[in-house]
Structures are given as C-alpha cells and as structure tokens.
Amino acid sequence: MTLMERTLKKDVEGVMLPEYSEFLKSHYEMNEKVLFVQLPQMILESFNPEIAKRGGCYAFPPTGLQCLYEALKARGLEIRILDLNLQLLKRTREETNFDYEQWISILEETLDSFAPYIVGVSCMFDASIGPFTQTLEVLQERERSVVLTGGIIATYEYARLLDKKLCHFVVQREAENKINYLFDQITSKNFGQSPTDGICFEHKGALYETGGEGDIVHFESDMIDSYSIVKIEDYYQNGSLNPFVRMSGEPFAAIQMTRGCRAACRFCAVQSFMGKGVRTKSVDSVFKEIEYLVTKRGVRHFEWLDDDPLFYRQNFLDLLRRITEAKLDVTWSASNGLIARSLDAQMLEAMRDSGCIGFRIGIETGNAEMLKKIRKPATLETFRRVSNVIKNYPEMFVVGLFMIGFPEEKFSQIMETFLFIIELQMDWSGVSTCQAIRGASMFEDYGEVFDEQMESKGATAHNYLPIRHSRKLEISVHKGTLKGLDVFRIEPDSVPDADQIKEIWFAFNLIGNYINNRNLTRQGDAEKFIAWVEMAQVPYPTNPYMSLFLALAYQIKGDGRGAEEYRSKAVEFSQTDYWRQRFADFKLVDILENFPQTSQETFDSIGALQEEIGQCYIEYQKSKGGQ
Ligand code: B12
Ligand code: SF4
C-alpha cells in the first residue's frame, strides 16, 4: 500500500490508543525520565564555524519545549531539554577539534547517560529536516525509548514518519493538552486529562488519530519554572536571534503573549497551525515572566515570538506601560512582522518609551492585485500612511518585509514591489524569496516538493535568503540568467524561474538597502545605518558591499578612521572574480577607487550612483508607460 493510500482512521471509541500504549509499556523499560530535543536549526551544508564563533547563528531558546515542560511539570517526571542547536554552537565555539558534522554524537552521549523512557523531538523548519531524520533513525536503531515528534514539520508529515516507523507518535499542532492525554496512557500515572484529537500513531497496520475534542490550549501559564531546566544565559553567549538583538548587545530571551493571528495570508502557515483567531495571556502573567528574567537571570533584551502581538491592543499597551513604569530598563524588538494597520501614534509612542529598539512590518508586495491575492490585511495606502507616521519615531529601526517570487508572479508585479521599496524609504527592506511551506493555503498542491524534501532527508530544503545557500555566501545560477542591472530587462509578462529570482533578489537588496538607503542621504541618520549593518554583517563577515557602504556611512559621520577601516576591508574582500564582477555590474568600482573624502563628497558620490543606477528602472517604468 502506498503512503497516499494509507488514510488516517479516527479512533472514535478511544480503544486503539490505550491498546497501543499497553504494548509500548510492556516493550520498553519504563522509568521517569523524559528527554525533549530541539534540533539544529541551520542547513548544515552551509554552516560556517567561523560565523558561529562570532555569534552570527540562530540560538533561539526552545520555547515550544518549555511549554511542554510547563504542561507536564505536575507529573513529577524528570524532564530534560537537549538543545542540539545550542550544543552544536557551543562546542563549535569552545572546542577547537569539534567536528560539527558529528553533532549527532551529542545526542548519543545524552541518550547513553540519561537513558530516557520517552524522547520527544521537535521539528519546526525545513532546515531541520536532515537532522530530524538522522535523529529519528538513531532512536529507531537503539529502540530503547518511546519516541514522540511534534512541531510544524512533524504535524504535516505524520503519515510518512509513522509509515517509516521513525516514531511511535506524532503530536500535531499545539501540544500542551495532547501530551498530557498521551502521558496518561504511556506512563504509570493517569492524571485524567480529557481526550484530545491530534495524536497520530500506527497500530495493527493502520494509521490512527485520537478522536477527542478539537483541542484548543488555554494559553495562560508563565514560563518561569521551565527556566530551571533551560540555561538562558548560554543562549546569548553562543548565538543570536537577529540584528536587533545584536544591536542591543545585551543578554536576551524570547517571550510570547499571544498565539495565532487575525489574518490568514495565503503564503503563511500560522492559521492552519494555530487555528483561527488570537488567544492571549494576561498582562500579569507576561509581566511576571519578564520581571523574573530581568531580576533573576540578567536578561536585558526581549524578542517577541508572537505573530500578532498588537491584536489585543489594550493588553499590549498595558504591558508596555507596566514595563515603562517599572523602570526595568530593558530593550525589546519584534522581528516577526507587525500588522501595519495597528500601528498609530499612541502605539508607537508606548513602544518607544518601553524600550523598543526596532521592529518589522509585513508588507510583502507593492502590487495591489498581489496584495489581495495573498490576502494580506492591508492596502498599499495603509503602508504609505504607516510609513509616514513611523518617521516621527526615529529612535526605532523599522524594517519592511517583502517577498518576491510568489507562484505565477510576473516580473512586472515584482518590479512594483521594488518601486514600492524605493518609495516607502523604510530604514531597511527585508526581501526574501517566496518558499513553499507546509500548511499555507498557497502551497496546498505542492505535495511533490514536500515529498522530495523528506525523501532526500532535507537535501532539497533551501534557505529563504539566496545568499545563505552556500558556505561561501555567493549565489550561483544557471547559464542564461540575467544578472546585475540586466535584471531590469526581464520581460515584464514573464514569470522568472528560481535562479532568476535569486539574481533579482540580489539586485533589489543591493539597490534598495545600500545604494538608495535614506539614512545615507542628507535627510537620514548614518548612525542608524551603521548600527544595523554592522550587526547584519556578523553572518556575512567578508561581504564587500556591506563594508563599502559602512565606509561611506562612517565618512558621512565624519569618522575618517572608521571609514578607512571599512574601505580597506571592501578592497580586500572584493578581490575575488565573483565580487569583482558584482562590483562592476552595479557600478561600485568607481566609488571604491575614488573614495569620497568628506561627508559632502560622500552625499554627492552616492547621489551620482543613485542617479546612474536609477536610469535602469526609470527606463523600465517608461517602457511600461509610467512616470
Ligand atoms: C520565532 C519563529 C522563527 C524564529 C526561530 C524560532 C525557533 N524556535 O527556532 C526565526 C526568526 C529564526 C524563524 C525563521 C524561519 N521561520 Co519561523 N517562526 C517563528 C514563529 C513566529 C514562532 C515559533 C515559536 O517559537 N512559537 C512558540 C512556541 C510555543 O510554539 P511551537 O514552537 O510551535 O511549539 C508548540 C507546538 O509546535 C508543539 N511542539 C513543538 N515541538 C514539539 C515537540 C514534541 C515532541 C511535541 C509533542 C510537540 C511539539 O508544542 C508546542 C506547544 O504547544 C513561528 C510561527 C508560530 N506562531 O509558531 C514561525 C514559523 C514556525 N516559521 C516559519 C518559517 C517558514 C520560517 C522560515 C523558513 C522563514 C520565514 N520566511 O519565516 C525561517 C526558517 C528558519 C530556519 N532555521 O531555517 C513558518 C513555518 C511554516 C512551515 N510550514 O514550515 C512559521 C509557522 C510561520 C509562518 N509564516 O508560517 N522563525
Ligand atoms: S499577518 Fe503575518 S502571521 Fe498573520 S497570517 Fe499574515 S503573514 Fe501570517
């Protein structure tokens, strides 16, 4: 029978789970030990130990697993969290001879010493599919523990995981209640959790899902107790979350107040995973957690994990006010993309006063038709209005998020995104290439892509930033792909292929964020540019255009020494064939060779460069009948 033919049966009578659990209890040696595993969160083929040593890799605390600890803590079990991502980074930094490709040995050591009866593995991202498969294969081979999986990839890939007998249970979506129901069955103590749906398993040759009520988690508990098994101090010493966190330069933690999102954008999986609507914790609960992390654990910067933290507007304002009044003197950032229409003067003021140093806004596209098609809850006018209001709060660094390469997106539509980036003049425009993800309605019929990712054990999973595809941080594309300023010659009605999208991405990022950055003009603030780009450069230490524009920013500031330091780095890093060609393509050779000597000269040189490059897209607009 093929995988597709194996339909999931509902265990309506609730007999299969107890039966299967009894079998497992008799088969495995029971003890009180539970190990939860967070996987490496990078594509290991492009992992660069030097970048890890500089703190340039993701080190997100295992929030989802901490939630499970909170949900299970009353059971008196010995629960541990093994964060393989963190351990890989830590060992790379601390041990000269550590071979990161042998990361699996960290898991094996823990399994040997801890010998857990239950192991739960979390898989959230495509990037972790390789490590996910490898981890499950090790557990399968050892055959000493009951293995559960959860998180996004596990939720949508339940049939394959069970079919290949890579785990005993897949616990889908939010798992606090489900795991309690499951633990009632597979451990020695029954705490009487009412049955839930969403626990999948294979028994007697058939795939079953538990038949309980559609489960919604009452989302309230703070996470303070879970920090007894998570050494948060290790996270900021071994990695980072994003440039905001690095800008703050302070010990960080992640925090969550709400789950879910009011919107249902078609490229996004949040609603399918979290269910409709938004649920929130109380202000008290979140404030208590923040206070604990600040006073007891030395945390000074918070990053929101929420998808729609502004939905319960008054709650959020109250929380910000409490943070301000308590004089906790913390900073925070919201990297996930706030919903533009909730941002007004009152909200922005409260955000700034409570320590917000920056946030992102989900804009996605500059094409009105595409905006509707992807069901973004905004119009181009909303973004125009909000980008103007934001300019009154220059203390915060604001990033607009954009995507290119939606299915069937024509180049003319992609160009409108580019022109919108230039028009809005945010502090930064984060452009990413659209990727098929599980659970998003736009990719319902992308089964083959997901199959391939799983069957290749993650080898076909890509990074959403093309420059991160290779360890050398260079883009390679097939012959015939238009590069440099030639991308503006792409046929407007054509749908660019994946390689062409990578080159468009390169041009948009360089032109939109560097050549045309408002903070490098007379009306801008070069300090802001420096603060961001120096931190954004950590994962790209040898990128010559980042160094070149940092040199220009220092020159604007009148800091000749800083300018010279970065100028010489730009010269050094641009000596490879790849970068020589890139600099020639984007007309950067002249400004590097005849480096401006004063801030006035710098403004003039950047202005001249903007004009020269601008010809290409102005010509494009003209050819389309625009201004
Ligand atoms: C913070 C975040 C990030 C962080 C990293 C977070 C981390 N922990 O590593 C950053 C910014 C790096 C990131 C990057 C990306 N992310 Co992201 N991210 C999120 C976000 C907003 C929150 C995740 C989170 O911590 N949630 C809070 C905790 C409490 O929930 P949870 O982790 O889901 O855990 C619960 C359940 O999943 C389950 N569970 C989890 N593990 C386990 C294990 C077991 C054994 C069991 C039983 C249960 C279980 O129980 C937990 C409690 O209920 C989610 C959206 C969301 N709201 O979930 C998107 C999300 C996960 N990201 C997504 C995507 C696509 C990405 C990116 C590919 C790029 C992008 N365009 O956003 C990159 C890829 C990263 C990479 N390494 O390659 C998608 C994934 C969709 C999919 N089908 O693949 C999501 C859902 C958002 C979306 N737009 O659709 N992301
Ligand atoms: S607003 Fe953001 S989190 Fe909400 S559905 Fe759209 S992309 Fe997803």
Image: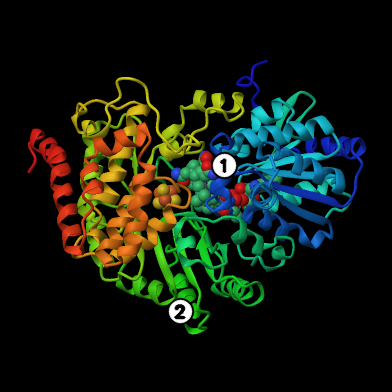
* Residue density around tag 1, few if under 14, some if 14–19, many if 20 or more, within 10 Å: some
338 with respect to 586 (left or right): right
Residue at which label 1 appears:
42
In the picture, the quarter occupied by the N terminus is: top right
Residue at which label 2 appears:
321
* Front residue (pair 249, 608): 608
Residue occupying the point 25% across, 55% down: 517
Dot 2 amino acid type:
Arg
Q: Which label belongs to residue 223?
A: none
Q: Secondary structure at mark 1?
A: loop
Q: Secondary structure at mark 2?
A: helix
Farthest top residue in view: 1
Q: Nearer the viewer, mark 1 or mark 2?
A: 1
Dot 1 amino acid type:
Met
109 with respect to 49 (left or right): right
Answer yes or no: is residue 406 visible: no
User: How far across and how far down the image is residue 234, in percent?
Assistant: 66, 60
Relative to 234, residue 199 above or below: above
